[in-house]
Image (tube, coloured by chain):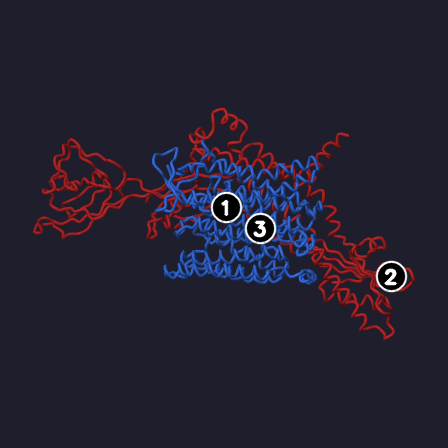
Chain colours: A blue, B red
C-alpha cells in the first residue's frame, strides 16, 4: 500500500497518452486481423487466436514497461487487463489445438511453447495479484512475446501421435516440465529484480547486457562465410520445411553482405563492453558516459540489422555452395537467429530502462529481502516439480524403450539442471547463501533450463526428436 | 597418528565443499558427453567422419567417446555417493539429538539470544501460562507443561519430523544410485526378431553375444495400423510365453505396453517386412464339374512348400513365390523383396497317377525350367490375395535394480514434500521477572524455514495470548507493555 501511495504522489506524467496509444494500436491490429479472418472465414483457428494473444501480450509488455518507467498504477491495471485478454486468447488456442489434434498439446516444440507461454502468463498474473510483484510483466511478457513469435515460425500442422508418444505418462511428464520450467522462468525474473533492488551497480548490468549481446552476435556470426555472406538454411515454401540434402543434412544458402552488416553490429554491441573495461581500469567517468551512448547507438544499429535481416530473408533467392541453382529461404528456417536478434535488442532496452528509471523501479519493487525469499520459494516449488518431471520421463522411457535412463542429451541436461538447482538449495540451506550469490545461482539455473529446452533440441542429437 | 589420516579423508569427503566440487565435475563430464558423439549410439563410420584420426584417438584414449560408461565417470558417481553417505553420517548424530531430545525448557541465555520473542506483562504465573496453553492448543502446537526444579514453563511444537526429512531425500538418492548400480552389473539389454508362428528362447545382447532365456517366447501375430494419412498409429504383437513345453502367458503388446515375465521385459521395438510370403489365397475352380471327385469352386490359403488337397485325388503345392519377378532368358529372377510384381509357381498333382503339372500365376510362357502347363490342370487357379510375412522386433531387457530406482523416486518425492512444505515450528512460554521485578510472560518461537511467514504467525499468537489475558484479568490490569525483540 505504501508503495502505491508513494507512486501516486509523483507528478502525473503524460501517462494517458501512452495508454490511449497502446489501446489504439491493439485495436488497430485486432481490426486488421479481423479483416483477414473474415476473408479466410475461420474465426477460432489456433493461429488466429495466437495472433490475438500476441497482440495482447505485446500491449501488456509495453504497458508494463511504461509502468516501469513512470510508476503510474493505472498502467498496471491496463497491463493486467491486456494480459488477461491475451491469456484468454492463448487458452482458446490451446483448447483449439487440443480439440483438433485429439491429444494434449505437448507433441511438438510448437505445442510445448503454446503450453509454456500459457503457464508463464498464468504465473505472471499470480505473482502480480498474490505477491504484488507488479513489474514482473516487464520481464515475463517479452519472454511470452518471443515465445509466440517463435511459435508463428515453428508452427506445425496437426500430426497424429506416433506410437511412442501415446502414453499418459508422457502427458504427466510434459505437464510437470512446463510447470517446472515456468517456475524457473519466474525465479529468474525475481532474481533479476532482486539484483536491481540490491543496489547492484548499473555498470555491472551494462557489462552483463553487452556480454549477452556480444555472445549472441558471435553465435550468429559462426555462420559467417567468405566475402561477407551469412549462410542460412534454405526453405521449401511448398512443403513448409527446411531443404534437406540428405537425411539430417540441411542445405545452406548464402545471403551476400549480411555477414558484414552483422559484423558491424557486433562491433557496435562490443563497444560498450570495451568502454566499460577501460572504465574499470582508469575510473574515468567520461568513459562510462560514452559507453551508455554506445548502447544507444548499438540499439539503433541492431534494429537496422534486424530489419535488413528480415528484408533479405523474406525476399530473393540465394546461391548455395553445396548445390546448383538458387533457393529461397524464410524466417521460419532461422528461428534462432531471429530470436537472438530480437532478444539482444530487448536486453539492451531493459538496460536503458534501468539506466533512466532505476530509482522509480526500486521504489515499485518489493524489498530486496522479500524478493530474495520469493526467489527461494519459487525454486522450492519448481525443484520438486523438476524431480517428478524427470521421474515421470524415466518411467515413460522404461515403458517405451525398456530403459529408464539412457544418458541421451536431453536426459543428461535435465539431470544437470536438477543438479544446479540442488546446488542452489544446498548452498542456501546449509551455507546460508542469501542475496546476490543466490540470485546469480538462480539466473544460471534458468539459463541451463533454456538450454535444455531449446539448445538440446536444436544443437545436440538424441532421442527427444519430437520436441 | 595413522588413524588420523583416514579420519581426515572421511571429514573431507563429508564436507559440503567436496560435494559441490564433485557435482561440478559430474556436470562438466556429463555436458561433455552430450556434446561429443558417443560410441555405442553413433556408428564407427560417422565417428570417423566427424573427427580427425588424431582427435578420435585422443577422445577414445581419454574415454570421452563413451563418457557415461568410462571408469572415471563411474568413479566420480561412486565418490558422490560416498560423499552423500559421509555427509549424512557426520551430520546425523547432531540432527538426531536435536530430533530425539527437543529443547523444552529455555534458559536465560537462550531466551535472550532467540531473535523472535516478546514479553507480556502478567499478574499471575498460572493465568499467563494457561492463556498461552489455550492459544498454542488452538494453533495445533500441542503444548506441554515442563516442570523443572527451579522453573516451570510451556513448550509447543509442530512437524518435528521435517528436521529429518533431508536424510530421507539423501537416502532416496542413494537408493536410486543403488538400483542403477545393480542394473549396470546384473542388467542386460537384448533384441530378438520373430515372425508369425516363430518361437525363440535365445536373444542377442547389445554386445552381440547370444543369451538363453529360461523360457521361450512365441509370436502369434504382429501388425501395424495406420492413420488416414499413412503415418503409423499402432504396432502390436501377440506374444505367448512357453515354459517347459507349456504355454504359461499370453499378451498383446503395443509400443507402451510391454510383456513382463520373470523380471524380463519384452518391448515392441520394430516391425517390418521380411520379403517372404506368409499365405497365398487362391480361388480353385474345377474345369470339369462332372469329373468323379470334383469339388465346387472355393478359396484356399496356402503357404510356401505346403501341400493341400483339392479333392480326394488332386493335391496342390506352392513350390515358389517371387514377390517382384522379372523374366530373362527363360528364367525367373527376383528383382527385390518388395511386393511389386508377384509370381507363384504351383504344382498340381494326382495321387493315383502321380502325374503333376506346373501352374504359374500369372501365366509366364517360354520358361526353360518347369514350363507353364496351366491349361492341363484339373482346377483353374486364380490368385486372390497375397499376405506377406512381417517380423516383429522385440527389445528384451532385464533390470533387476529398477525397483530400487522407483522406490527411491517415490521416497524422494515424499522427502522433498516434507523438506519444503512442512515447517518445524517451536514455541515456548516462560513466566519471568524483568529488571524491575515485574512479572512477565516470556513467549518465544522459531521455525526451521519460512521465517517471515512464521514471524507473522507468531505476532498473531502473541495478540491472541494478550486478548485471552485481558478476558481473564481483573479490571486493574496494567496497560500492556509489549516489548518486541524481533528483527
Numbered disc 3: what chain?
A: A
- Residue at 66 percent across and 49 percent down: it is A196
Whether labels 2 and 3 belong to a single chain: the reply is no
Viewer-nearest residue: B18 or B369? B18
What is the distance, in whole Å, between disc 2 and disc 3 at their CAs? 50 Å
What is the distance, in whole Å, between disc 1 and disc 2 at their CAs? 66 Å
Whether labels 1 and 2 belong to a single chain: the reply is no
Which residue bears the numbered disc 2? Answer: B432
Secondary structure beneath disc 3? helix
Q: Quadrant of residue B323?
A: top left
Relative image position of residue B457 (x, y in whole percent): 72, 62
Secondary structure beneath disc 2? strand
Whether residue A169 appears in this view of the structure is no
Relative image position of residue B335 (x, y in whole percent): 24, 35
Q: Is residue B438 left or right of residue B9?
A: right
Disc nearest the viewer among 1 and 2:
1
**Residue A185: assigned label:** 3
Q: Is residue B110 left or right of residue A413?
A: right
**Residue B197: assigned label:** none
Q: Quadrant of the C terminus of chain B?
A: bottom right
Relative image position of residue B409 (x, y in whole percent): 57, 49
Amino acid at each position: 500500500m505504501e508503495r502505491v501511495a508513494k507512486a501516486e504522489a509523483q507528478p502525473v506524467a503524460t501517462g494517458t497518452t501512452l495508454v490511449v496509444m497502446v489501446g489504439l494500436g491493439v485495436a488497430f491490429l485486432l481490426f486488421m486481423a479481423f479483416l483477414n479472418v473474415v476473408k479466410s472465414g475461420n474465426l477460432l483457428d489456433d493461429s488466429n487466436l495466437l495472433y490475438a494473444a500476441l497482440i495482447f501480450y505485446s500491449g501488456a509488455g509495453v504497458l508494463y514497461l511504461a509502468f516501469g518507467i513512470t510508476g503510474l498504477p493505472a498502467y498496471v491495471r491496463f497491463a493486467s487487463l491486456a494480459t488477461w485478454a491475451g491469456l484468454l486468447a492463448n487458452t482458446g488456442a490451446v483448447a483449439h489445438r487440443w480439440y483438433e489434434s485429439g491429444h494434449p498439446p505437448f507433441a511438438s516444440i510448437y505445442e510445448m511453447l503454446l503450453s509454456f507461454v500459457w503457464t508463464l502468463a498464468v504465473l505472471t498474473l499470480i505473482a502480480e495479484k498474490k505477491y504484488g510483484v507488479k513489474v514482473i510483466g516487464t520481464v515475463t511478457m517479452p519472454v511470452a512475446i518471443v515465445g509466440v513469435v517463435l511459435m508463428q515460425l515453428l508452427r506445425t500442422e496437426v500430426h497424429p501421435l506416433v506410437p511412442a508418444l501415446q502414453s499418459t505418462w508422457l502427458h504427466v511428464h510434459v505437464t510437470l516440465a512446463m510447470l517446472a520450467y515456468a517456475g524457473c522462468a519466474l525465479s529468474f525474473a525475481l532474481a533479476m529484480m532482486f539484483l536491481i533492488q540490491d543496489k547492484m551497480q548499473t555498470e555491472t548490468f551494462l557489462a552483463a547486457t553487452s556480454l549477452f549481446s556480444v555472445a549472441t552476435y558471435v553465435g550468429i556470426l559462426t555462420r559467417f562465410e567468405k566475402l561477407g555472406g551469412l549462410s542460412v538454411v534454405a526453405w521449401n515454401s511448398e512443403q513448409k520445411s527446411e531443404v534437406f540434402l540428405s537425411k539430417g543434412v540441411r542445405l545452406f544458402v548464402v545471403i551476400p553482405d549480411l555477414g558484414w552488416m552483422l559484423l558491424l553490429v557486433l562491433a557496435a554491441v562490443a563497444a560498450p563492453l570495451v568502454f566499460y573495461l577501460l572504465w574499470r581500469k582508469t575510473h574515468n567517468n567520461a568513459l562510462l558516459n560514452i559507453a551508455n551512448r554506445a548502447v544507444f547507438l548499438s540499439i539503433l544499429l541492431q534494429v537496422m540489422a534486424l530489419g535488413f535481416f528480415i528484408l533479405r530473408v523474406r525476399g530473393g533467392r540465394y546461391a548455395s555452395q553445396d548445390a546448383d541453382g538458387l533457393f529461397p529461404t524464410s524466417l521460419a528456417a532461422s528461428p534462432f537467429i531471429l530470436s537472438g536478434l530480437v532478444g539482444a535488442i530487448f536486453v539492451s532496452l531493459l538496460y536503458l530502462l534501468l539506466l533512466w528509471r532505476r530509482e522509480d523501479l526500486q521504489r515499485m519493487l518489493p524489498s530486496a529481502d522479500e524478493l530474495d525469499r520469493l526467489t527461494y520459494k519459487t525454486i522450492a516449488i519448481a525443484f520438486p516439480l523438476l524431480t517428478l518431471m524427470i521421474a515421470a520421463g524415466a518411467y515413460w522411457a522404461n515403458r517405451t524403450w525398456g530403459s529408464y535412463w539412457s544418458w541421451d542429451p536431453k536426459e543428461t541436461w535435465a539431470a544437470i539442471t536438477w543438479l544446479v538447482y540442488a546446488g542452489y538449495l544446498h548452498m542456501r540451506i546449509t551455507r546460508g547463501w542469501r542475496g546476490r550469490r543466490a540470485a546469480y545461482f538462480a539466473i544460471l539455473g534458468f539459463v541451463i533450463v533454456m538450454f535444455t529446452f531449446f539448445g538440446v533440441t536444436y544443437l545436440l542429437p538424441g532421442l527427444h526428436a519430437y520436441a | 597418528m595413522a588413524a588420523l589420516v583416514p579420519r581426515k579423508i572421511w571429514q573431507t569427503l563429508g564436507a559440503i565443499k567436496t560435494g559441490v566440487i564433485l557435482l561440478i565435475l559430474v556436470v562438466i563430464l556429463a555436458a561433455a558427453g552430450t556434446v561429443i558423439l558417443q560410441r555405442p549410439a553413433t556408428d564407427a563410420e560417422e565417428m570417423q567422419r566427424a573427427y580427425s584420426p588424431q582427435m578420435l584417438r585422443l577422445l577414445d584414449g581419454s574415454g570421452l567417446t563413451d563418457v557415461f560408461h568410462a571408469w572415471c565417470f563411474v568413479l566420480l558417481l561412486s565418490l558422490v555417493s560416498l560423499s552423500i553417505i559421509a555427509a549424512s553420517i557426520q551430520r546425523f548424530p547432531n540432527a538426531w539429538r536435536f530430533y530425539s531430545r527437543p529443547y523444552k525448557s529455555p534458559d536465560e541465555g537462550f531466551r535472550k539470544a532467540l531473535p523472535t520473542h516478546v514479553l507480556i506483562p502478567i499478574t499471575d504465573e498460572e493465568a499467563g501460562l494457561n492463556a498461552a496453553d489455550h492459544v498454542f492448543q488452538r494453533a495445533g502446537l500441542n503444548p506441554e507443561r515442563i516442570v523443572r526444579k527451579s522453573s516451570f514453563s510451556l513448550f509447543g511444537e509442530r512437524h518435528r519430523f521435517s528436521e529429518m526429512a533431508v536424510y530421507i531425500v539423501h537416502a532416496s538418492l542413494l537408493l536410486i544410485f543403488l538400483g542403477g548400480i545393480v542394473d549396470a552389473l546384473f542388467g542386460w539389454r537384448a533384441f530378438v526378431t520373430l515372425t508369425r508362428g516363430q518361437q525363440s528362447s535365445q536373444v542377442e545382447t547389445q554386445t552381440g553375444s547370444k543369451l538363453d532365456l529360461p523360457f521361450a517366447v512365441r509370436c502369434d501375430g504382429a501388425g501395424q495400423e495406420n492413420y488416414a494419412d499413412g503415418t503409423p498409429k499402432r504396432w502390436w504383437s501377440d506374444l505367448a510365453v512357453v515354459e517347459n513345453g507349456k504355454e504359461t502367458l499370453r499378451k498383446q503388446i503395443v509400443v507402451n505396453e510391454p510383456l513382463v515375465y520373470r523380471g524380463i521385459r519384452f518391448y515392441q521395438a520394430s516391425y517390418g517386412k521380411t520379403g517372404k510370403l506368409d499365405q497365398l489365397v487362391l480361388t480353385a475352380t474345377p474345369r470339369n464339374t462332372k469329373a468323379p471327385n470334383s469339388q465346387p469352386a472355393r478359396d484356399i490359403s496356402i503357404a510356401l512348400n505346403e501341400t493341400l488337397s483339392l479333392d480326394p485325388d488332386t493335391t496342390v503345392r506352392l513350390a515358389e513365390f517371387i514377390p517382384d519377378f522379372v523374366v530373362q532368358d527363360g528364367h525367373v529372377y527376383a528383382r527385390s523383396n518388395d511386393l511389386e510384381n508377384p509370381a507363384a509357381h504351383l504344382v498340381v498333382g494326382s495321387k493315383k497317377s502321380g502325374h503333376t503339372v506346373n501352374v504359374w500365376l500369372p501365366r509366364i510362357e517360354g520358361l526353360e525350367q518347369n514350363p507353364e502347363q496351366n491349361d492341363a490342370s484339373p482346377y483353374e487357379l486364380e490368385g486372390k490375395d497375397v499376405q506377406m510375412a512381417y517380423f516383429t522386433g522385440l527389445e528384451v531387457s532385464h533390470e533387476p535394480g529398477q525397483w530400487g530406482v522407483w522406490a527411491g523416486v517415490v521416497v524422494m518425492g515424499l522427502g522433498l514434500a516434507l523438506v519444503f512444505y512442512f515447517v518445524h515450528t517451536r514455541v515456548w512460554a516462560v513466566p519471568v521477572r524483568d529488571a524491575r521485578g515485574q512479572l512477565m510472560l516470556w513467549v518465544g518461537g522459531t521455525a526451521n524455514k519460512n521465517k517471515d511467514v512464521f514471524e507473522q504467525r507468531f505476532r498473531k499468537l502473541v495478540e491472541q495470548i494478550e486478548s485471552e489475558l485481558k478476558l481473564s484479568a481483573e479490571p486493574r490490569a496494567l496497560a500492556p507493555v509489549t516489548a518486541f525483540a524481533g528483527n
